[in-house]
Image: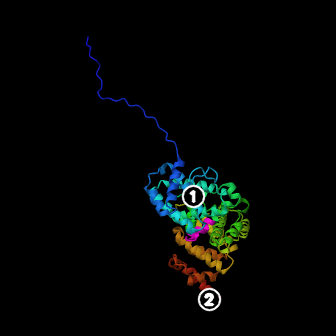
Amino acid sequence: MSTKEKPTLGGARIKTRKRNIAVPLDPSTFADAVVQIYLEHEGDLELIAKDIEASDLDFSRYGDTFFEVVFTGGRNQPGTTKPEEGDQQPYSVLNREATRQSILPYVLYLQKIIRRRPFLIKNLENVMKRLLQSLELYDGDDRRKLAIFTALTFSQKLSGLPPETIFSALLSDSLVAKGTVLGFVTDAFKEFLAENSLDDLISLLKRAKMEDRLLDFFPMQKRTPEAFADHFSKEGLGVLVDYNMKKVFDVKLKELRTTLTDQISANADLAEVIDMVKQRRKEASLPDVDVVRAIWDAIMDAVQWSGKNQQQNVNLALRQVKTWATLLGAFCTTAKLEIDLLYKIQVHCYEDAKLMKLFPEIVRALYDQDVLAEDTVLLWFRKGTNTKGRQTFVKSLEPFVKWLEEAEEEE
């Protein structure tokens, strides 16, 4: 019987599983180190930035702590403005004056830091969100500093900061109810518009998904267009008032057009439709010219296009115009409104290939039902200024105009 030993693999090592060793968080030591850099350079942000960039501090682990030092001078006790134990530096954002000149250098300083460490933008977002959610803990002067800082971060296009997070952080019921949020956004809007256009502000609000929610910044009892206009007019932000008025106007006009389309599609009673339009016009103070345009759009929107037979489509559209011409006539009551309607029809027929050949028939139908006067048609034919498809339409309308002119001569 063989006494040989079983072969073994020479040099084989038995691996032991490593345990995840938890390194204790030590934000206090990190904060003290950052504070010392501030103190060494006596608040000189250029020198501080250089030392921050050259340091081996663990920003990936303590990014939030870094921004707490930037804003408040040190670490704060959670949910308060009281400092935690540890060093404090007096060169923080909230220790500056509430002016653009004092706050802007801090925004530019953070731009440098974040360019070298892009991951820090998330930490800035976290800290700003906490600060804005705790606005009631700060006095009016500190809130204004935060508003200026917030406006400048977007004005200077601080890379990657999401406006939707910043603005949504303000929509706390208690903060809104006290008027704290309205004061904050007013200061922020004024600062932003100091060097940016209204279009820039609207673009920012769209990115923040707040373009249609500006009244949400107002206490519940003041969420009216009148309160909006009164507040921002007093604050010197008339451009914002004008924008909101147009926004409200557009919404009312769109609602009118939608309702009209539904009623026309359902062949509602003409008298009831006219009464509804008059009531909406009065309630929303809608100009007659916009009402007439909305009626025309609704008439066209309600056409049930078949999409198959071109002639059938043309007949449907013309029938719709003839059926609801009286509705147009009820509001198209002046020569000025008539010529505007004719321009509206011209542009519509030019932009919709299905209607190009229908233009003269529409004009004739509206003339027959006393919506368009003879003088209006002749004025458009001889002196019309809108160039969209004009040559084609003038040529197609020549036989009707010739008939009008001959009738005029006979009279």
- Colour option used: rainbow
State which region is magenta: 187-199
Judge from the rendering whether residue 245 lies leftward or rightward of residue 36; answer left or right: right
Question: Residue 180 at what x, y percent from top left?
Answer: 68, 60
Q: Nearer the viewer, residue 261 or 100?
A: 100
Disc 2 to disc 1, how far (Cα)? Answer: 84 Å
User: Which one is in front, 382 or 166?
Assistant: 166
Residue 212, quarter of the rendered image = bottom right
> Main SS type for the magenta part?
helix
> What residue sits 58% from the left and 80% below the top?
400
Q: Badge 2 is on which residue?
A: 409
Residue at image location 56% in from the left, 57% down from the top: 89
Q: Nearer the viewer, residue 68 or 12?
A: 68
- 305 lies above or below 78: below
Residue 282 picture location, percent across and down: 73, 70
Q: Position of residue 60 (x, y in %)?
A: 48, 50
Q: Nearer the viewer, mark 2 or mark 1?
A: 1
Reading the image, the residue beneath label 1 is 71
Circle 2: residue type: Glu
Tell me, yes or no, whether the highlighted magenta stretch contains residue 188.
yes
Lower sequence index among marks 2 and 1: 1
171 versus 410 height, above or below: above
